[in-house]
Image (cartoon, grey):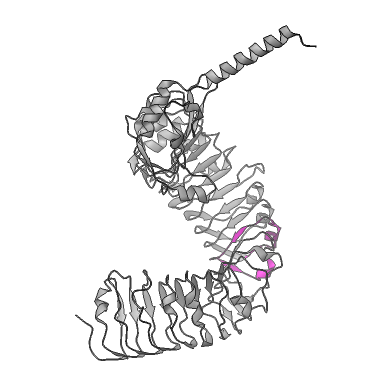
Amino acid sequence: MVSNNQLCHLFLFLCFFQITCLHAQLCTQEQTSALLQFKQQFSFNKSALSNYCDSVGIHSYPKMESWKEGSDCCSWDGVECDNNTSQVIGLDLSCSWLNGTIHPNSTIFYYFPHLQSLNLAFNDFGMSPISSEFSRFSSLTHLNLSDSSFSGKVPIEVSFLSKLISLDLSYNYGLRLEEPGFELLVQNLTKVRELNLGEINISSVVSNSLLNLTSLTRLDLFYCGLLGKFPDGIFHLPHLNELRILYNPALTGYFPEFINSSSPLQDLELQQTNFSGELPDSIGNLKSLKKLGAFGCKFYGSIPTSLGNLTETTHLGIGYNNFTGMLPSSLSNLGNLVYFGVGGNNFEGKITDFLPNVKGLLYLHIGSNNFGGPFPSLGANLTSLVSLDLSNTQLTGPLPSQIIGLPNLTWLSLEDNLINDTILSWVFSLPALEYFKISNNKLTGHVKQLKSTHLRDVDLSNNSLHGRFPSSTFTHVNLTSLILSSNNFSGELDMLCYAVSLEILVLSSNRFNGSIPQCLGNFSTYFSVLDLRKNNFFGTIPNTFVKGNYFETIDLNGNGFEGAVPKSLVNCKMLQVLDLGCNKFSDNFPH
């Protein structure tokens, strides 16, 4: 049994322990005052990138509102203190609605010598420069200033933060890293593991000093204006699992051999660079690779069969290169694919020989190749598709009689093929469809009402479709573009005024008739292209073109319009094409 004396000692110990812990977590008055003064520099504006934060699952709210005089700053939102010293060691003010400027004489630079982590991402600092005073945080290991509207030159003093493990300056569109800034960063930050300089203007050759950063796990140089040849040794850094150098069109390089099958690379994105050469067979050794982005480069040759060994891959994008030959059937091994994009090459053969039949596939983009043959029957597993692009692939014959179970399909692109068939009802019943393009085929038949309420872009031009076009299409409030030219459609525009988002309407070379609704010129803010050429419209043109409209093309040639040319056409200040010929107008264009 425990004696009363022992219980007393235990009670005193617990009291002492609790008092000690409470004392250790009390923020110093000096740091409390400094943080409150720092708070005074900002207003809180929810629009300051909070929408982006919420979209990626980061809760945005004004963290500084919890900062009150008389309370312990170690309990404030976004503030982290050391349990032993009470010193502030971390500030996370990301997604905090901050709107203002961080001045060089700000108190934050002078009272936090032990700060180890500073995150100011996703705020709005008004295109102000990054102060050289950030170098005072000599203990800093993590610095994140991403997407916070900084501009100007990155101060060289940032390279003095030699303890940095993670540095993120990305998505500050007005920021530049001038020589010798990039070289100094790479030479001095020898402990850095994550280096993200995406969308900073570097405009220089990639430093070979990067090869010395053997601790790197992530290197992001997206859209930096990089020049010259990319050092292929960077691909082999021992811990690198993410390499993003996309959108650097002047950057050259090639895929090196990957002899070591234990490479940690998981994310490799080279798209829109000047990389060239063939894919080495050893690319199949990248067993951990989940994302390969190489579209819009200058790669050529055939696709190695070993690419089918990358069974962890979820994103494979090698479109718009100069690849040739047949896609290997081994690609059917990629059972985790979410995105499969090989469009814009010179591939040939049968689509069914390599078509991934993966239950989780969301994006299938294989258009602009030389496949040919009949329209493929989509496998039963492809029910999750969001986007399907089979355009310009020389597909022939009829559409499959039925495609069911595509409730999520938002993009269907079948244009520029040789499909000769009666357009089938399954096309119109897709419930989530937003973009529907089937132009330049040999389709016949009537168009039924499109069931999707999400329609944005519809192009059925250059077919042999006929009959009355369903005017209910204009009631889709999201509709921005409707192109029906060169068919045999008929009908009126009686419901045009409901298309409040319409920007492009092309109905030329059909049999549409009736008069033009009085709303023309004032119902859609961004209406820019109106092409009614060679139809059977009649009546007068409404005099309703408002000031500030966006019309660039108005083509009414070859109809039966009469009466006066509307004087309000003078309000179309952006007009580039106006054709009123072959009508019955009674006067000339107004002055």
Above or below, 398 against 114 in this view is below
Q: Specify whether residue 591 is painted magenta.
A: no
Above or below, 285 against 417 in this view is above
Occupied quadrant, residue 101: top left
Q: Residue furthest front?
A: 4
Please state the extent of the stretch shown in magenta in the rendering: 326-353
Q: Position of residue 519 (x, y in %)?
A: 36, 78
Instruction: State which quarter of the image contains the N terminus.
Output: top right
Which one is in front, 403 or 366?
Answer: 403
Residue 84 visible: no
Q: Position of residue 429 (x, y in %)?
A: 61, 75
Residue 424 visible: yes
Which one is in front, 87 or 203?
Answer: 87
Q: How many marks?
A: 0
Occupied quadrant, residue 502: bottom left
Q: Residue furthest left?
A: 591
Q: Position of residue 52 (x, y in %)?
A: 48, 50
For image coordinates 32% across by 88% down, the residue present is: 540
Q: Specify whether residue 339 is painted magenta.
A: yes
Q: Residue furthest right?
A: 1
